[in-house]
Amino acid sequence: MSDLYAALGADVLAAGTVLWRSTNAGPQVALVHRHKYDDWGFAKGKLDNGESLAACALRETWEETGVRARLGARLGDVRYRVPEGSKLVRYWSAEARESTGFLANDEIDELVWLPPAEAGVQLSYAHDVEVLERFTAPTSVLLLVRHAKAGSRKDWEGDDDLRPLSGVGRTQAEHLVDFLGRFAPERFHSAVPVRCVDTISPYADAHGAKIEREPLLGEEGYWQDPAAGLARFRELLARPGLTVLCSQGGVIPDVVETLLDEYDPLVTGVPDPEKTPVPSRKGSTWVLTTDPTGALRTADYYPSPT
């Protein structure tokens, strides 16, 4: 059993999405019908060798629906028994981006798009209804990234804002390219230090995107005026679509903890959110989503990708 299977306590791992799209009448979610079992559920499937759960969720969504999507909030895990043992399915919200058209196959013979309330009635299993109940079509998604590992502060004699990433940090930044790509961000912001900018520049450069500097959201600027820094963060969080912000370990826990206390969102990736200090290791990401009222709906922590 691989480390991932052992860590999650499962013999079989799978992943899927609550795939959604916007319409003039409101959001719709996709359900697929399996003719072998005559049941309705979400697009999902088993991991390929060496595949991450997030990558599996997107691949299975495309294979079963013909839709290319981008990830949003994690919606939790479903566990049940199968002949091979314990099975875990991890779900994400995923926004439809483009479609090559649905094609029925030996497994999936029908795809329907329904408003969430109707989808809840159509679903065949109670555990899928519970996943759907956690879903809200987000108004905005913000990926709050801590910069990757940098060279030693004590060994750096110049302006600390110019202290570069270490070799390990550059590798972390390269690994972030695939991770960020699963969310397909549209805008890029960074605290002033070079190590913050260089953490997200491999992805931004590959997509011809500019990175806007945010003096209020680095450690120096934030702690000179925390109220102004938090106000600027809220502005970025409120922007529709998907935004990336790279900041520092002296800022991220304070911002995230303030929002968690204010909104009490669904939190994943932290063993016990109420007792555990807000994590923010180098190269890690908080994925934050808001609902149509502007409230923080979900907060998902991801360690540095490897």
Image (cartoon, rainbow, N blue to C red):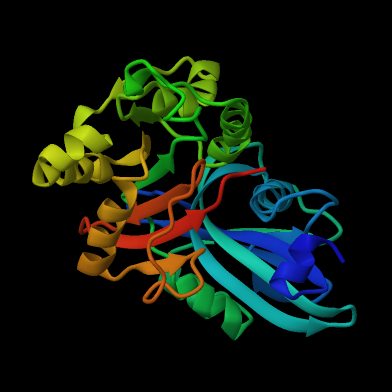
Toward the viewer: 9 or 121?
A: 9
- Left or right of residue 17: residue 12: right
Toward the viewer: 21 or 110?
A: 21
Q: In the figure, residue 253 lies in which quadrant?
A: bottom left
In the depicted structure, whether residue 63 falls above or below residue 199:
below
Query: What residue is shown at x 41% (from left), y 43% (from top)?
Result: 143
- Left or right of residue 4: residue 20: left
Toward the viewer: 133 or 167?
A: 167
- Left or right of residue 176: residue 155: left
Residue 162 drawn at (x, y percent): 37, 18
Q: Quadrant of the C terminus?
A: top right
In the depicted structure, whether residue 169 falls above or below residue 271:
above
Query: What residue is shown at x 77% (from left), y 49% (from top)?
Result: 51
Is residue 116 visible in this depiction of the protein?
yes
Q: Please count the marks in the image.
A: 0
Query: What residue is shown at x 53% (from left), y 78% (from top)?
Result: 129
Q: In the figure, residue 226 lies in which quadrant?
A: top left
- Left or right of residue 228: residue 174: right
Toward the viewer: 51 or 149?
A: 149
Residue 224 drawn at (x, y percent): 12, 38
Query: What residue is shown at x 33% (from left), y 63% (from top)?
Result: 297
Q: Quadrant of the N terminus?
A: bottom right
Residue 292 drawn at (x, y percent): 25, 56
Is residue 211 visible in this depiction of the protein?
no
In the depicted structure, whether residue 228 falls above or below residue 260:
above
Residue 213 drawn at (x, y percent): 28, 23
